[in-house]
Image: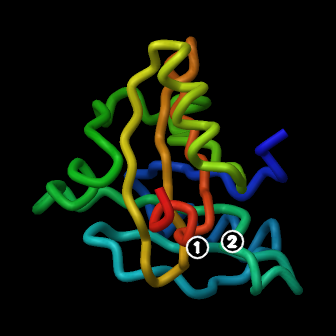
Amino acid sequence: MPISKLAHFSVRTTSLEASRRFYTEVLGFKEGYRPAFKFPGLWLYRGGDEADFGVVHLIGIDRDDPSGLVDYLGDKDESALFGSAAVDHLAFLATDLQDMRQRLQRAGLACRERTVPDLGLHQVFVEDPSGVTIELNFPATEALST
């Protein structure tokens, strides 16, 4: 199976600071490294998982310039960002990018791909039948070899 583990879950929030306080002060996560994406946010880690990519990704909304977020993850109506709808996507670590591309093509599923050089990851975004965005993270070297 190409999926190796759950990487993180992302919450899109209109209250980034309140979310930061909840996840750090109440649940005990620690703020850590986050690439310089063109939208606000935080990556939160458990103690000892700094070699990973964080457990919780908080995605802030810049009402003055939402274009960075829209370009990267797509647009979502702010009124829908409550309860489970605030969960933006689930991410998995995976291998065998070529096989996954073939699986998605056979299933007739559209996807978006991009590479995050800072992390050495190649990402594939696809929606499940319920409209939940699934992010699959492959080693970037797999994208270079295909």
SS state under label 2: loop
Q: Nearer the viewer, residue 62 or 48?
A: 48
Q: Is residue 23 left or right of residue 18?
A: right
Q: Is residue 48 left or right of residue 94?
A: right
For badge 2, the amino acid type reads Gly
Look at 83% across and 52% down and name the residue there: 5
Give the class, few, some or many, for how many residues have Cα within 10 Å of label 1's Cα (few <14, many ≥20): many
Pick the quarter of the image with the N terminus: top right
- Name the mark on residue 61: none
Give the class, few, some or many, for how many residues have Cα within 10 Å of label 2's Cα (few <14, many ≥20): many
Answer with the quarter of the image where residue 112 lies.
top left
Q: Which residue is mark 2?
A: 54
- Where residue 143 sits: x, y (%)? 48, 61
Answer with the quarter of the image where residue 120 lies.
bottom right
- Where residue 92 sits: x, y (%)? 70, 50
SS state under label 1: strand
- Where residue 93 sits: x, y (%)? 71, 56
Up the image or down, 125 lies above or below 23; here it is above
Up the image or down, 92 lies above or below 117; here it is above
- Please, which residue is most extreme toward the left here? 64
Q: Nearer the viewer, residue 60 or 113?
A: 113
For badge 1, the amino acid type reads Trp
Look at 60% across and 26% down and name the residue there: 103
Q: How many numbered discs?
A: 2
Q: Which residue is mark 1?
A: 43
Up the image or down, 83 lies above or below 14; here it is above
